[in-house]
Image (cartoon, rainbow, N blue to C red):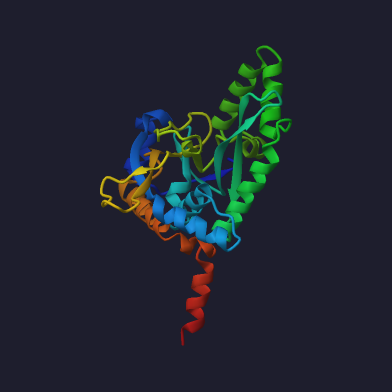
Amino acid sequence: MRADGTRLRGLTPIVQALPYIMPRRYDAQNWASDMIDEDIVRAYIRQKRREGRRVTHMSVLAAAYYKAALENPKLNCFVVNRRIYRRNHFCFSFVLLKKRADGTPDETALKIFLRPDDTVFSISERVQEAIDRNSEAAHNNRTDRFANFAFAVPGLARVVFWLFYHLDLHGLLPRRIIDLSPFHTSLFITNLASINTSCIHHHCYEFGTTSVFICMGKPIRRPDALPGEKGKAMPLGVVMDERIATGVEYSRFFAAFTRYLRTPEVLESRLDGAQELRAEAAVLP
């Protein structure tokens, strides 16, 4: 019945039982820490810019995550009302810091939808287009306009969000609202490195369907760095809903995710690997 996902069937008894044992997302949160080799990623970004291609840390991370998720689809699942669903699209949300007309800081949430034929370049372009479109002080996106309307009338916000929560609980929330909501997303990213802030472990929201939250912190020196070498690393704080995948599935996903961050060149081809498969088929006798 849901507009954004299909209920998974044939799951093992223990996996089916987890949403009943841990009915709330905050009950099922696991925290993990990881490191991006900042020297590799920064060198890659600089090389692409010398070639006239704009790539950012966020686009590299999002592309690596999506490629790994295409290979490990359980990471694009979510739990609502004790049921596990496979999402029928992939998107990621992030918060954009901007300024109001009077100069005071403001934030807005953006959501980017990805496709299997995307590359790190197309993702970077889509992210930049969204940032440019929403950076103007006077601009409010549809999510902001809806929130402003809901809070304009006393008591309306409580009614609206109560209604949305319960419609979502029973799979009746319209796709149009789901597409507006940054909390109905495959992945939420926060880039605290952009404001020179240390990494944190950010909770996954109970409202919506966010199953994984990744925070990028300001780069630090790697503990194993040798004297005289740069040895920079960007810490990642990862919070994940353990109900959507087993430990083995999470392990395989993060092994692939880390591998792609260490070799960002592979993200320049279609993330679903279709080009590689066609090339292999062409050389077969």
Q: Nearer the viewer, residue 20 or 244?
A: 244
Q: Is residue 45 above or below residue 131?
A: below
Q: Please state if 102 lies on the left or on the right of 158 as rendered.
A: right
Residue shown at 71%/17% (left/top)? 152
Residue 172 is situated, as x and y percent measured from the top left of the image, at: 61, 34
Q: Is residue 10 above or below residue 259?
A: above
Residue furthest to the right in view is 138
Q: Nearer the viewer, residue 208 or 218?
A: 218
Residue 18 in sight: yes
Q: Is residue 120 above or below residue 28?
A: below
Q: Please state if 122 lies on the left or on the right of 14 as rendered.
A: right
Q: Please state if 138 lies on the left or on the right of 20 as rendered.
A: right
Residue shown at 58%/61% (left/top)? 117
Q: Nearer the viewer, residue 275 or 44?
A: 44
Residue shown at 44%/47% (left/top)? 75
Residue shown at 67%/16% (left/top)? 156
Residue 72 in sight: no
Residue furthest to the top in view is 154
Q: How many marks?
A: 0
Residue 254 is situated, as x and y percent measured from the top left of the image, at: 37, 51
Residue furthest to the front in view is 228
